[in-house]
Amino acid sequence: MILDSPRGIHVAIIMDGNGRWATAKGQLRTAGHIAGARTVKKIVEAAPDCGIGTLTLYAFSADNWRRPSREVGLLMRLFRRYLVSEVARCVTNGVRMRIIGRRDRIPAELLRAIVNAEQATRAGRTLDLRIAVDYSARDAIIRAAQAIDPVALSDPASARAEFAKVLAYVDHGIGESKDVDLLIRTGGEQRLSDFLLWECAYAELYFTRRMWPEFGPVDLSEAVQEFRSRERRFGTVPQAAAG
């Protein structure tokens, strides 16, 4: 599957419910994060077969630094462990791994693992896997607004495209951006939580009560099928009405 194929949709997932899943089982919240990391592996493996070309996972928001230090420390270690353990599998399966969000507050060991994973998997063309760490969409938009040349916004016909390029560069460091087709949130909550606000302007939203550790390939396939059954009009009228 080629990334720029019309069939390769961009799916973004807010992986919510790890802590509540663990608490409901009488376990520590950290157990939920460990189980959630296993779910990530399953979803990444299943994504190409669902027609997904780009998969963006919301792993850690800029606001998550306010969580208990023990929980934050575990999450950082889990990120590093995932990156180190999955590089070989990603290379074999053609998965390109990239991290979006700030990097100046990330622990040095994790940052080294990020750089190594991105370099090792840069040739992947089956799936573009983006993991959002220390991410805030509103902060990214502010940084893009500060960085863009006002002249680039003077032409209304190209202003949005030019801003999107700058946003992708200052936020992702990759110089490219792709609108989200389908946003999935697990855990029962129904909000975007400062995730890909610009890219989700016309995204289809799919909310499920299933907690992230319980979310599997079948759930992903059902969400994509639901997405494909919807009529996306992007501000226009339905085709039948237009005729």
Image (tube, rainbow, N blue to C red):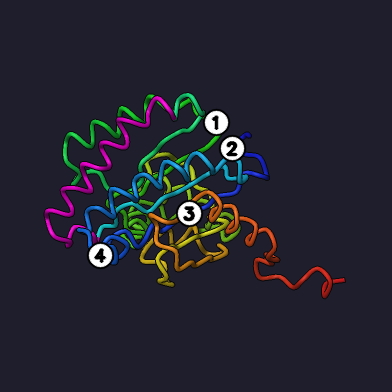
Camera sees residue 215? yes
Q: Main secondary structure of the magenta part?
A: helix
User: Could you say where residue 74 lies in the image, as x and y percent from the top left?
Assistant: 19, 47
At label 1, counting other C-alpha atoms closer than 10 Å, the crowd grade (few under 14, some 14-19, many 20 or more) is some
As drawn, which residue projects farthest toward the front?
26
Residue at image point 29% right, 34% down: 114
Which of the marked residues, 1 or 4, is nearer the chain's N terminus? 4
Q: Amino acid at mark 1?
A: Arg
User: Could you say where residue 241 lies in the image, as x and y percent from the top left?
Assistant: 82, 75
Q: Amino acid at mark 3?
A: Ala
The stretch of residues the image draws in magenta is 63-89
Q: Secondary structure at mark 4?
A: helix
Q: Nearer the viewer, mark 1 or mark 4?
A: 4
Q: Which residue is mark 2?
A: 3
Q: Is residue 22 left or right of residue 46?
A: left
Q: Nearer the viewer, mark 2 or mark 4?
A: 4
Q: Is residue 160 left or right of residue 130?
A: right
Which of the marked residues, 1 or 2, is nearer the chain's N terminus? 2
Q: Is residue 158 left or right of residue 38?
A: right
Which of the marked residues, 1 or 3, is nearer the chain's N terminus? 3
User: Could you say where residue 67 lies in the image, as x and y percent from the top left?
Assistant: 17, 61
Residue 23 circle label: 4
Q: Nearer the viewer, mark 3 or mark 4?
A: 4
Residue 12 circle label: 3
Residue 15: say if magenta: no
Q: Tell me the CA gap for discs 3 and 2.
A: 15 Å
Circles 3 and 2, Cβ within 8 Å, touching? The answer is no
Q: Residue 57 versus residue 234: which sits nearer the camera?
A: 57
Vertical placement of residue 48 versus 60, above or below: above
